[in-house]
Amino acid sequence: MDTQAFLKQRLICVAVIDQAEDGVPLMEALLSGGLEVIEVTFRTAGAAEAIRRIRQSLPAAHVGAGTLLTADQVKQAIDAGAQFGVSPGLSEGVLKAAHEHRFPLFPGVITPTEVMRALDLGAKQLKFFPAEAAGGVNMLKSLAGPFGHTGVRFVPTGGITAANLPNYLAIPQVAAVGGSWMAERKLVAEKNWSKITSLTAEAMHVIAQAK
């Protein structure tokens, strides 16, 4: 799958889904707000089933699996129908499993050494995590300097909100931004789909203005 297809909206909703049956209505709420991309984190027992249901019910959605920590989880994500994967850190085993299955994966990096290691392993699309806690926009700009010519692209995630979203989008090496503020775990548990739709629409408006 061409990663550009799901990066073109420049936003990935990072969602923790406790009940698998909440996956489809959550994705419908995001689509109603104008966003087609979701990363379902592998932090709950229902994650794989939620991915499976979204893929079966909503072909317009681009569905990824997040918090992939092991090669086995990469396989579980692929079996569930995930179209891309995201890892909080840089694991050779996880990357190898993804490469073997031609599965687009965004490994997490935070330091120049990790970026260099990722490049050595053939990964150029990287998650910058935890973004805000590690220095935010200024840190990412500093990283982009020495690596700008390598073709590396970042997806900053962690602590990003509608307020600081434009600052990240202004960095040329940022392909997209990962965020959970439009679909926080509490909102999903409460099934507050209308609130999720309005927050998503607001985020998409911010992105349109940033362009």
Image (tube, helix red, strand yellow):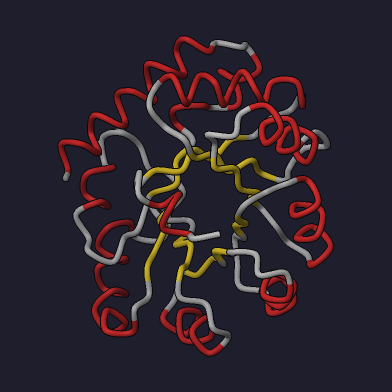
In front of the other: 16 or 100: 100
The part of the image, by quadrant, that contains residue 108 is bottom right
Side of 118 where 42 appears, left or right? right
Quadrant into which the N terminus falls: bottom right
**Residue visible at 67% across and 26% down in the picture:** 57
Q: How many marks?
A: 0
Horizontal side of 130 relative to 25 (left or right) equals: left
Asked which quadrant contains residue 52, the reply is top right
Q: Residue 79, percent across and down? A: 81, 51
In this rendered view, identify the residue nearer to me: 3 or 154.
Answer: 3
Q: Quadrant of the C terminus?
A: top left
Q: Position of residue 190 (x, y in %)?
A: 62, 11
Q: Please tell me which residue is depicted at 21% across the width and 49% down the height of the picture.
A: 167
At x 57%, y 67%, the residue is: 107
Q: Give how far across and how far down residue 162 sits, in percent.
A: 30, 33
Look at the picture and state if 205 lies above or below 192: below
Left or right of 10? Residue 95 is right
Residue 130 lies left or right of residue 207; in this view the side is right
Q: Where in the figure is residue 114, as x and y percent of width and height?
A: 50, 80
Image vertical order of residue 132 relative to residue 26, above or below? below
The residue depicted at 65 percent of the width and 49 percent of the height is 65
